[in-house]
């Protein structure tokens, strides 16, 4: 679909800060994502350079997890690198711990949640029990060398619900790529389970280990149960929810956002560039491919060297939609990266929240931060919606994941990010 721009994109001179939901955190709209530091970035100096540049440009919010890095070499490394950087910069007098807001996460698989001298048991799962959550939190604080955590998040549910790419509910772990600890039978909403987990979080708050807490990869049911349980127990509600959200996946804007909206839980989305697909760099031979390739070889990017990691972002239907958004960005004189990030920032479901980006180079940091200085006209926001009506949530599958990965119904138009396509 062709589009002619009649309204201009406005460029501001600096990043905005605002109060993060119901917390006392005054954060930048840009949140420094870190999940590939230790895998696709294999040297701490690469992470240090990106952190230095992001902070120099005004960013003050960092998101990480005990699980990171991802794709390979899972767990601990990312937090350790951030901690080494933070300690070094504080000692150099370049910043104070209080200048930054640091968010991290505990995952129910326990990856990264054991001391270095203790091996994680095979097939281990937990339910965010108090002792386990406190141990994970203390280990994260030690690695991050940060004294306390500003925002501590439950990385994904321990109960038997779908996550990571499935748009359809099914119980007992169906549509879930990893094990679960807790099975909730039909007719049993799990009051005891949510109470136990909220009290585990309260323990961390009471001990001063964390300032605020949040959810991640949650759905409307989970947000509702956590918030009502917290209210009943007199525990502060979670302040944010970190879910997959992009031009290729707007499922969050359905009933999950209503639950978040009603309870005052703000958005902290990840995946806004869909693993780099929405940057346009996986369209070989285009100017976006050439620009990215000059900075860091596309052949070394995640979709090319680790195609089995989050393949949903580069499925044929995702690529077809991404191509339309790339063309739309070009018609307004912005980069595809700028469109994807600025659009997410302006969506109502993220009002009062922040957007997590993922970078592997300093140049990527600069472009991403630049996107948060844009104000997109309403005409362009509507043009995005029109494209979306043609390409609805293409990075999600509803029932048959393998069929979506193949995209055979697209015929010759079926290309993936994993393979050169021009």
Image (cartoon, rainbow, N blue to C red):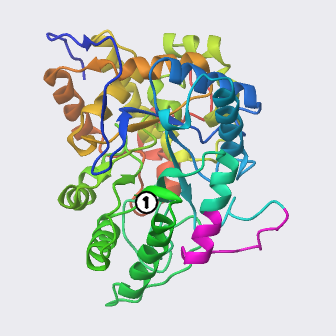
**Residue 380 versus residue 291 in the image, above or below:** below
Give the residue displayed 44% in from the left and 43% down from the top: 270
Which residue occupies the foreground of this view, 133 or 347?
Answer: 133
Q: Residues within 10 Å of mark 1 (few under 14, many from 20)?
A: many
148 horizontally vs 190: left or right: right
| Up-down relation of residue 280 to residue 39 (above or below) | above
The segment highlighted magenta reads 117-136
Residue 310 vs residue 4: left or right?
A: right
User: Taking the image as drawn, is residue 148 in sight?
Assistant: yes
Q: What residue is shown with label 1?
A: 166
Residue 213: x %, y % from top left: 42, 58
Q: Residue at x 34, y 71 (%)?
A: 235
| Residue at 56%, 19% in the rendered image | 53
Instruction: Name the main secondary structure of what is drawn in magenta.
Output: loop
Q: Nearer the viewer, residue 37 or 340?
A: 37
- Look at the numbered disc 1 and give the secondary structure of its residue: loop
């Amino acid at each position: 679909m062709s589009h002619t721009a009649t309204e201009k994109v406005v460029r501001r001179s600096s990043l905005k800060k605002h109060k993060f939901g119901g917390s006392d955190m005054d954060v930048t709209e840009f949140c420094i994502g870190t999940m590939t530091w230790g895998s696709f970035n294999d040297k701490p100096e690469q992470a240090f350079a990106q952190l230095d540049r992001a902070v120099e440009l005004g960013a003050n919010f960092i998101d990480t997890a005990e699980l990171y890095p991802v794709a390979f070499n899972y767990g601990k490394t990312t937090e350790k690198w951030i901690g080494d950087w933070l300690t070094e910069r504080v000692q150099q007098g370049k910043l104070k711990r209080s200048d930054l807001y640091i968010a991290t996460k505990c995952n129910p698989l326990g990856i990264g949640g054991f001391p270095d001298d203790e091996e994680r048991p095979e097939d281990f799962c937990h339910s965010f029990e108090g002792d386990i959550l406190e141990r994970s939190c203390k280990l994260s604080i030690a690695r991050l060398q940060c004294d306390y955590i500003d925002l501590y998040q439950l990385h994904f549910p321990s109960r038997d619900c779908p996550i990571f790419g499935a748009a359809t509910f099914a119980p007992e772990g169906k549509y879930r790529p990893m094990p679960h600890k807790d099975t909730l039978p039909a007719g049993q909403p799990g009051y005891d389970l949510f109470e136990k987990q909220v009290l585990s979080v309260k323990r961390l708050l009471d001990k001063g280990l964390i300032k605020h807490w949040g959810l991640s990869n949650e759905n409307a049911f989970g947000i509702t149960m956590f918030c009502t349980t917290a209210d009943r127990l007199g525990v502060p509600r979670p302040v944010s929810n970190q879910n997959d959200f992009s031009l290729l996946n707007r499922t969050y804007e359905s009933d999950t956002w209503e639950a978040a909206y009603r309870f005052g839980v703000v958005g902290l989305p990840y995946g806004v560039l869909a693993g780099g697909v929405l940057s346009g760099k996986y369209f070989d031979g285009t100017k976006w491919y050439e620009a990215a390739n000059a900075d860091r070889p596309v052949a070394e990017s995640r979709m090319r060297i680790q195609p089995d990691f989050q393949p949903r972002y580069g499925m044929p239907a995702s690529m077809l939609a991404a191509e339309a958004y790339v063309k739309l960005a070009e018609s307004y004189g912005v980069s595809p990266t700028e469109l994807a990030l600025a659009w997410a920032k302006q969506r109502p479901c993220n009002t009062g929240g922040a957007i997590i980006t993922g970078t592997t180079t300093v140049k990527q940091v600069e472009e991403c931060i630049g996107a948060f200085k844009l104000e997109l006209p309403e005409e362009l926001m509507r043009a995005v919606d029109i494209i979306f009506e043609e390409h609805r949530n293409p990075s999600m599958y509803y029932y048959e994941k393998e069929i979506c990965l193949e995209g055979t119904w697209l015929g010759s138009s079926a290309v993936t990010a994993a393979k050169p396509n021009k």
